[in-house]
Image: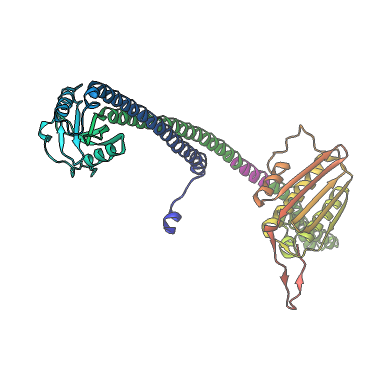
Amino acid sequence: MARLFNRIRISYGQKMFLLASVPLILAVSAISFLVAAQSRALAEREIHSLEAQLIEAKKRELRNYVTQARNGFYFVYGSAAPNDELAQKQVKQILAAMIYGDEGFFFVYDYDGNNIVSPRQTDLINKNWLDYKDSEGTPVVAEFLWTARSGAGYVEHLWPKPSSGVEARMITYVTSFPSWRWAVGTGVFIDDVVASVAATRAEVETRVQRTFLYIGGITFAALLVVFMSGLFINIRERRLADAKLKELTQRVFDTQEEERGRVARELHDGISQILVGVKYALDVTKRRFSQGDDRAQDTLDKGIDNLGQAINEVRRISRDLRPGVLDDLGLGPALHALTDDFRARTGIETRFETAVFRNRLSQDAKIALYRIAQEALTNVERHSGATRVSVLLRGHRTGGTLRIEDNGHGVEETRDTSGPGIGLRNMQERMEQLGGTLRVLSSKSGTVIEAQVPLTHMLPPEKDGSSKPKARA
C-alpha cells in the first residue's frame, strides 16, 4: 500500500481540486442522508396517521353494521329464552340475509368454535374451527371467542376472500349473545388500506430518490463548476508561470550577458591596456639593452610596476566574481573586505559591525547575504547620494540578519528596480529562495535594508583540533 501511494503523484491543481471537491461532496452527502432520513421519518409519521385514520373509519363502519343488525333482531333476542330454538332460527335467518358490498357478511360461532352462520362461505357451517389459524399463525376463531367472552372488540387477522379464496388482511368486530353463547360479528377487508399505505410509501421513496437525484445533479454541476474554474485558473496560472519563467530566463541571459560585458570591458579597459603598456615597456627595454642605453632599467621597472597593476586588477575582478575570502574565512571577513573596498573606491564613510556567531551560516545563505550587500552598496553608490553607510551582521535565536543603512534620499518610487543583476527585486528573490524575509524601509532621510535568514540555514559550530568551537559566519 505504501508503494502504491508513493507511485501516485498528485499535481498541485489536482490537490486544489480535491481540497475544494472532497469537503463539498462530504457536506452534500451528509445533507442528502439527513434530508432523506428526515423525509422518511416525516412521511412514516404521516403514513401511520393515514393508516390509523383509515382503519378507524373501517372500525366505525363495522360498528354501524353491527348496530344496524342488532336493531334488526334485538326484538327477537331480547324476549327469547336461552334455549328458544325458534328465536335462534329467526336470528340466524336474519343474519344470513345481511350481506353487503362484494365481500361483507355476518358470521356466528358458538362458544365451542362451531360455525352457525356464514352466508358467503357456507362450507364452514356446522364445522368446528376452534383450532383454525391464518398464515401468520393467528388463532382467528379462538380470538373471536375470547373477544366475545370479554364483551366486544376488534380482531385484526388474515381471512380468505369469499370471491377469490385468497387471504387478505381483515378487521372484524365481534360481540356476544351471552344467553345463547354466541359470538356474532362482521368484518371488512382492509387490503385497500394496505394498498393505499404501500402506494404512499412508494411515492415517498420515489420523492426521496428524486431528491437524491436533484441533490446529485446540483452536486455534479457544482463539481463541474469547481473543475472548470480550477482548470481555467490552472491554465491561467500556468500561462503566467510560463511567462514569468520566460521572463526569468531572459533575465538570466541578460544578467549573464551584462556580466560578461562588464568583465570584457574591465579586461579590455583595464588589464588589456596595462598589458599593452607592459609589452611596450619590455620592447623599449629590449631595444635599449641592445643599444647599451642606461635607461633600460627605468623602462624595465615601469613594466614591472604595470605588471603588478595587472595582477591586482585580475585579483579585483576575481574577487568581484567570487571572493575567495568568503569560502576561506566566512561571511564576516568577506563583508569587511567589501566595505573596505567600497570605502576606498567611493570615499563614503562606511562602518561595518558583526557579532560572533555561535552557529555558522550555510553556503547558500552566505552567498545570498553577500550578494545582497553587494547590490545594496551598488545602489547606494549609484542612486542614493548618501555620505554614510553602516553594515551590521549578527546572529540571533531566529536566524541571521544583515542590516544595511544609509542616509541618502531614499528609494525613488518611479525607479525601475527590476533590472538584471541589481535592485530590490533581486534581493527579494534571493531571500525567497532561502525562505527568508527582506524588509525595506525608505524615507527622505535614508534607507534601511534588512535581510533575515531562517534557522534552517544555520549550521552547528565547527570544531578545531582542540575540540573548541570556532565562531565563524
Residue at point 70%, 42% (across, down): 425
Q: Position of residue 281 (x, y in %)?
A: 78, 56
Q: Position of residue 242 (x, y in %)?
A: 55, 38
> Image quarter for residue 412?
top right
Q: Is residue 173 left or right of residue 49?
A: left
Residue lying farthest to the bottom in this orientation: 466
- Taking 261 as reference, is 338 above or below it? below
> Image quarter for residue 73?
top left
Q: Is residue 262 magenta?
A: no
| Overall secondary structure of the magenta section | helix
> Image quarter for residue 76?
top left
- Asked whether 145 or 284 is in front, the reply is 145
Residue at point 77%, 65% (across, down): 358
Q: Position of residue 411 (x, y in %)?
A: 80, 38
Residue 352 in sight in this render = yes
- Asked whether 59 or 396 is in front, the reply is 59
Q: Position of residue 445 (x, y in %)?
A: 88, 39
- Asked whether 376 or 392 is in front, the reply is 392
Quadrant where the N terminus is found in the figure:
bottom left
Residue 423 in sight in this render = no
Identify the image's colour scheme: rainbow, by chain, secondary structure or one colour: rainbow
Q: Is residue 458 left or right of residue 234?
A: right
Q: Which residues are magenta?
A: 249-261
- For the image, the number of numbered tags is 0
Q: Is residue 464 left or right of residue 406?
A: left
Residue lying farthest to the left in this orientation: 123
- Taking 467 as reference, is 123 above or below it? above
Quadrant where the C terminus is found in the figure:
bottom right
